[in-house]
Amino acid sequence: MENNLVTISSIIVAIIFVSLAIFQELLTLGFPLAEFTLGGYYKILPKKLRAISAISSLILLFMAVVVLKHAKIFNGLDFLPSYVLMWIITIALGLMTLANFISQSKKEKYTMTPVSAVTFLLCLYITLA
């Protein structure tokens, strides 16, 4: 039963990471969604910050692969230290949850805080299981 919960949790986390990667790509393309990120200072992300968004989307996709690898859903990339990477991802998500919670942007606070909090809790469960 526990293995099934880890599998389901890992798939949910991977879907969240891929969804956030798509969101980051939309920011990179200039969609007016920047109020949901980086403190909500911009409506459309400035061109200088779009590169950060593009890099973030790649990192999020890598994180999805790590989660799926750790749960043994994805085979291959055996050189990845998934246990260590899962702890890094989990700690980063905890910090992101705090940052989103104290954001001045209501849009970021009320959308990204719950997303990052749920993802943090799921990653913590996956890592500890």
Image: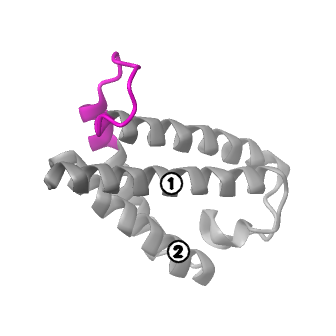
Other-residue count near label 1 (Cα within 10 Å), few / some / many at <14 / 14–19 / ≥20: some
Compared to residue 56, the image places residue 15 above or below, namely: below
- Answer above or below: position of 26 versus 73: below
Reading the image, the residue beneath label 1 is 15
Whichever of labels 2 and 1 marks the residue nearer the N terminus, that label is 1
| Residue 91 spot, x, y in % from top left | 31, 50
Q: Is residue 82 magenta?
A: yes
**How many C-alpha atoms fall within 10 Å of the one at disc 2: few (<14), some, or many (≥20)?**
many
Q: Which mark is residue 103?
A: 2
- Could you tell me if residue 91 is visible in this image? no
Classify residue 69 by image quadrant: top left
Tell me which segment is drawn in magenta: 70-88
Q: Name which residue type carries label 2.
A: Ser
- Name the foreground residue: 106 vs 16: 16
In the picture, measured across the screen, residue 70 lies left or right of residue 29, that is: left
Is residue 55 rendered to the left or right of residue 29?
left
Disc 1 marks a residue whose amino acid type is Ile
Among all residues in the image, which is located at the extreme top? 79
